[in-house]
Image: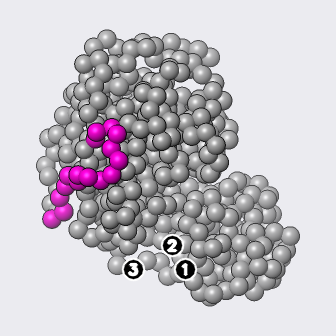
Amino acid sequence: MKEARPRTARGRRAGLGVGLAALIAAAVTALSMFLTVTPRASAAALTEVTNFGANPGGLRMYLYVPDRVAPRPGVLVAMHGCNGWAPGFHQGTEFASLADRHGFIVVYPQANKSANGMSNCFDVWSEAALRHGGGSDPVSIVSMVQHVLQRHNGDPERVFATGFSSGAMETLNLLATYPDVFKAGAPFAGVPYGCLGPAGCGNKTPQQWGDLARNAYPGYTGPRPRVMAWHGTADSVLPYTMLQEEVDQWTNVHGLSQTPASTDSPQPGWSRRVFGSGQVEAYTVNGAGHDLPHAGMAAYAIRFFGLDGGSSTTTPTSPPAGQLRGVGSGLCLDVPGAATADGTQVQLWDCNGQANQQWAATADGELRVYGGKCLDAAGTGNGARIQIYSCWGGANQKWRLNSDGTVTGVQSGLCLDAVGQGTANGTRLQLYTCHGGANQRWTRT
């Protein structure tokens, strides 16, 4: 198979040409990693599910339900690469063992499309696959998710996608075509949404990439999924430059700068860039080829999704939760209407002791509500809104509970503040320069 050679522009951009095989083929040597792993010790087993709903893609559905399922479990769709098999991806990755630990459910779709001699690829090129409600594989996968949500009392606010190569491409395809279903995705060695469609993988500006993703679901105005993208610098099947194209696309979709807010190295050989307040993360894996995820990477994805918090079936107790009562208002920090959607702004409201007012301060500095949602600052300056978001470990989700009653954001150093010194039900919360006023002081009850 001839490798597609990238064309460079502006010092870093690359195109992939029109060779479909080089774009969607997962290296067969990499696939062997997913087929030769010793089975895990667990009574739970991978099960094929039939008659799960509309299936225009003709896919097969495999399901892993751990022995101990969390109440209202999250749902993860995990997708193999070209030439791959769902059972092999189940055995060769760590998603199922993490499901055992944290109680979420994993769906493993089995692809069946062929192109240029490659088999078992997910459809990310047809007109049907590239638009909301169009049909093909995305509709089949959404049917699988709906089946699990209904049969296993799953949480529709905690539905995520991940995959390798062709599965990584389908991950971003699902985020673009069904942002109302999938809350975040973690593609390992993929390409941007729409890259294999008529628009092609040639050089595009962030705006052009973003428009392509937004046009997958015309008229949609709701929150957009978060993205954690991974790529190896020595990938000979899908060039490493594709990682930046994914970053350009999804930072634009979220209205963010292409300049990272922070960079670090969470593990030797890994470089992480975080954009905005964590809506987009990009991981560079130095020296890695077309063989992701490596050991330990799945756990980072699960943390990014918030599936490792609150739903763990191996943690006997959660951090003690309580109300945060404003000193100036006597009202409590409250999630309006007991909503669970990412991006819901918090408010002041009469204290009632319900779950939407119960905040658990973790050892990591998070303030968690409902177990898996964190108090989250949407910016770092005065007036930045305060919301709930799936816990992912970012500095904008870390808080200091100070002895004077103030609560300061670790990332910003600013205080949790009742807007306009408000004392009425519905007053919104923001970040603001600390001044010690009663609207910035809180007591735990």
Residue 153, compared with residue 288, is above or below; it is below
Q: Residues within 10 Å of mark 3 (few under 14, many from 20)?
A: few
Question: What residue would you read off at disc 2?
Answer: 370
Between the C-alphas of marks 3 and 1, the distance is 16 Å
Image spot of residue 205 (x, y percent): 63, 24
Question: What residue would you read off at disc 3?
Answer: 317
Residue 171 or 138: which is nearer the viewer? 138
SS category of the residue bearing label 2: loop
Residue 158 located left or right of residue 217:
left
The reply to whether the magenta stretch includes residue 291 is: no
The quarter of the displayed image where residue 381 is located: bottom right
Question: What residue would you read off at disc 1?
Answer: 355
Q: Residue at x 56, y 44 (%)?
A: 280
Image spot of residue 12 (x, y percent): 56, 20
Magenta stretch? 43-59
Q: Residue at x 57, y 18 (%)?
A: 203
Q: Residues within 10 Å of mark 2 (few under 14, many from 20)?
A: some
Q: Residue at x 50, y 12 (%)?
A: 7
Mark 2: amino acid: Tyr
Residue 49 located left or right of residue 191:
left
Mark 3: amino acid: Thr
Q: Residue at x 78, y 73 (%)?
A: 427
The quarter of the displayed image where residue 361 is located: bottom right
Q: Are marks 2 and 3 in contact (CB under 8 Å)?
A: no
Q: Nearer the viewer, mark 3 or mark 1?
A: 1
Label whose residue precedes the other's in the sequence (3 or 1): 3
Image spot of residue 5 (x, y percent): 42, 12
Residue 372, compared with residue 193, is above or below; it is below
Mark 1: amino acid: Ala
